[in-house]
Image (spheres, rainbow, N blue to C red):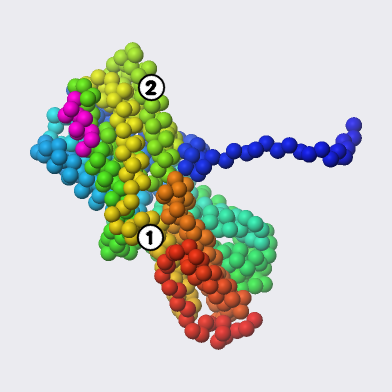
């Protein structure tokens, strides 16, 4: 049978595609990826066994505290290296233990009004500090959660005992993270499997960018390269496993990461200029990735043609990478951080103040309302008033998505988790059954973190099981009621105008200003003719990284309800222009290395991007740091080709 084309002219019907608003669409999306089986195993070996050991020796209350600490550490147990896990899990645990001690003594010595004021002030400071970065945000969250638990949970132990047990619970999970090998990653020293995977991913994404040169996917591939470099930078930034000198494996990884920076620079320049790249270059990059992943030698590497400055830079970088892989030695890679002064400026700048205001007010109001209801005995004899401020802390965190999305997911997840536990509690499970429930929930945590509703459901079941293990009756109804009340409080506080008008939309403006400053520093360094390439690569990394952080913050704000989303107006286009500027400066750097000057195309592009950025700032009402160019530019004095 021969198929024939249709010759009728009847209209084709199209189904209307219903696109949900951004705040709802975010609630319906979940992250995807392979199951992190190693994290699942760690979760199963953490909270449940700790609770079982405590019950076996008749110390149920201590087991509950240790299991809570392990649960919170499990939420932070994300993919990455062992080095970064020390900071990612350890710092929040230490801060959380301090919060538990402070909350315990404050709850024992202060009345309801004074305690609410203390928690409000603590929440405001913790909210400001959260703006510094992901680890600071996790630490501030654990500080507030532990402070509320310490103030409200009836436990026989003193504050310092609770703090030590909390540290032991979180430390147990950290010990598992450091000691257990990752399945399938035993090549070389298994302690560095996360670092090897992160560095290998950098080489793979450079190869992907070279494949996309001249095509429509080049911008997306360059964005993926930025993300891969960020992850590798974080993976190598943790504490050394040896105190005074890096091991051979660490030095090799540092050398391999450092060798990727000029390769990434050359690939970005090629994508900017759309220079043709033959298939040999991506093949060489993938061989390097395989060598990193398997801790093996690279073997012979195919070289690209040296027909243009960016291609010559790529060839030189490949040769340098091969030598670095053979030597296996390199210095400490560029690390982030402007020191205490920079962290202070971030925490108490416009973005930090705005977030601190909302966290403090939500946390303090939650504590005040909960204690008022508790003393009014609206919930009966068994009231867990600390649930309300604890829920408010998680709801007010922008790390977990837009505000309305967080509220919807929290409400749905709590109801689902409470119903599941209520069904389990129809037949009282007994101590062994509760330990089993906590163990299963601990194993599910690494997978549940992909969606806030799923995470909430798992945490709800786990917390209700711990409440029963501590000797209190089943409390599913109270959990639902206080969660819904916290949702209302956070929704109201989230849409209140901040006290200082300059702080409105402060997080978006602060991120955008930081990215613009980093772009200006990179631009000034390259066009000054300085020959410090290590500093240039560090400035380039910081520029792209701050731009990625700004883009993420803007996307999150744009997905809010209109009252909050308006603060992101015009910011996304400004980030796109800044990214184009940094791409152009990268191409300039490569061309200057090869010829000592720039072409009119380079300078025209810089002038055009800066002009468009200035016009856009005026239209969108944005205020960015001024960009200053050296006069004359290198091309005007050196080359016109």
* Horizontal and vertical percent position of residue 386: 23, 34
SS majority, magenta? helix
Instruction: Classify mark 1: residues with Cα within 10 Å, few (<14), some (14-19) or many (20+).
Output: many
Q: Residue at x 47, y 73 (%)?
A: 523
Secondary structure at numbered mark 2: helix
Residue 419 badge: 2
Is residue 80 highlighted in magenta? no
Task: Pinpoint residue 533: horizontal percent, then vertical percent.
Answer: 46, 72
Residue at position x 11%, y 39% from top? 110
Q: Position of residue 571 (x, y in %)?
A: 47, 59
> From the image, which quarter does the C terminus lie in?
bottom right
> Based on the displayed image, in which of its 4 quarters is residue 156 positioned?
top left
Against 52, is 42 above or below? below
Secondary structure category for the residue under label 1: helix
Residue 369 visible, this angle: yes
Residue underneath mark 1: 510
**Quarter of the figure with residue 215:** bottom right
Q: Nearer the viewer, residue 168 or 618?
A: 618
């Amino acid at each position: 049978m021969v198929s024939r084309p249709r010759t009728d002219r009847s209209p084709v019907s199209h189904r209307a595609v219903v696109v949900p608003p951004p705040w709802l669409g975010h609630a319906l999306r979940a992250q995807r990826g392979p199951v992190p089986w190693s994290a699942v195993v760690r979760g199963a070996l953490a909270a449940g066994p700790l609770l079982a050991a405590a019950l076996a020796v008749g110390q149920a209350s201590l087991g509950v505290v240790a299991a809570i600490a392990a649960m919170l550490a499990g939420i932070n147990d994300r993919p990455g290296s062992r080095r970064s896990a020390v900071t990612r899990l350890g710092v929040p645990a230490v801060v959380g233990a301090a919060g538990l001690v402070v909350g315990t003594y404050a709850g024992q010595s202060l009345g309801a009004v004074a305690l609410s004021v203390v928690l409000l002030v603590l929440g405001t400071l913790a909210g400001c500090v959260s703006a510094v970065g992901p680890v600071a945000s996790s630490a501030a969250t654990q500080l507030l959660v532990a402070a509320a638990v310490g103030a409200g949970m009836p436990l026989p132990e003193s504050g310092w005992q609770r703090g030590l047990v909390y540290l032991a619970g979180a430390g147990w999970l950290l010990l598992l993270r450091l000691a257990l090998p990752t399945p399938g990653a035993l090549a070389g020293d298994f302690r560095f499997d996360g670092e090897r995977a992160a560095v290998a991913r950098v080489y793979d994404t450079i190869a992907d960018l070279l494949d996309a040169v001249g095509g429509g996917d080049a911008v997306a591939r360059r964005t993926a390269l930025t993300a891969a470099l960020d992850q590798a930078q974080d993976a190598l930034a943790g504490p050394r496993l040896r105190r005074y000198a890096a091991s051979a494996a660490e030095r090799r990884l540092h050398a391999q990461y450092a060798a990727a920076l000029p390769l990434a620079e050359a690939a970005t320049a090629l994508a900017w200029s759309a220079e043709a790249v033959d298939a040999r270059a991506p093949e060489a990059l993938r061989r390097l990735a395989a060598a990193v992943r398997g801790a093996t030698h690279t073997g012979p590497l195919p070289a690209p043609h040296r027909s243009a400055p960016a291609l010559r830079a790529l060839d030189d970088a490949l040769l340098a990478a091969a030598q670095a892989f053979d030597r296996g030695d390199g210095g400490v890679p560029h690390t982030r951080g402007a020191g205490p002064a920079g962290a202070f400026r971030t925490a108490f700048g416009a973005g930090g103040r705005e977030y601190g205001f909302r966290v403090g007010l939500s946390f303090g109001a939650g504590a005040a309302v909960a204690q008022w209801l508790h003393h009014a005995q609206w919930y009966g004899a068994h009231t867990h008033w600390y649930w309300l401020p604890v829920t408010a802390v998680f709801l007010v965190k922008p790390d977990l998505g837009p505000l309305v999305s967080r509220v919807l997911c929290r409400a749905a997840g709590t109801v689902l988790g409470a119903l599941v536990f209520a069904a389990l509690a129809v037949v009282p499970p007994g101590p062994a059954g509760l330990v089993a429930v906590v163990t299963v929930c601990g194993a599910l945590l690494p997978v549940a973190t992909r969606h806030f509703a799923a995470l909430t459901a798992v945490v709800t079941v786990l917390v209700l099981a711990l409440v029963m293990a501590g000797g209190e009756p089943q409390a599913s109804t109270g959990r639902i009621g206080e969660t819904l009340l916290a949702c209302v409080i956070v929704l109201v506080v989230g849409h209140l105008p901040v006290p200082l008008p300059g702080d409105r939309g402060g997080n978006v403006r602060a991120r955008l200003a930081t990215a613009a400053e980093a772009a200006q520093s990179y631009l000034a360094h390259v066009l000054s003719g300085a020959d410090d390439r290590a500093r240039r690569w560090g400035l380039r990394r910081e520029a792209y990284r701050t731009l990625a952080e700004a883009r993420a913050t803007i996307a999150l704000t744009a997905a809010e309800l209109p009252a909050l989303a308006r603060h992101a107006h015009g910011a996304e286009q400004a980030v796109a222009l800044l990214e184009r500027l940094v791409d152009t400066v990268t191409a300039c750097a490569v061309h200057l290395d090869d010829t000592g000057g720039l072409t009119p195309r380079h300078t025209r592009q810089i002038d055009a991007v800066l002009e468009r950025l200035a016009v856009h700032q005026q239209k969108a009402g944005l205020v960015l740091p001024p960009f200053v160019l050296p006069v004359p530019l290198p091309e005007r004095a050196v080359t016109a080709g």
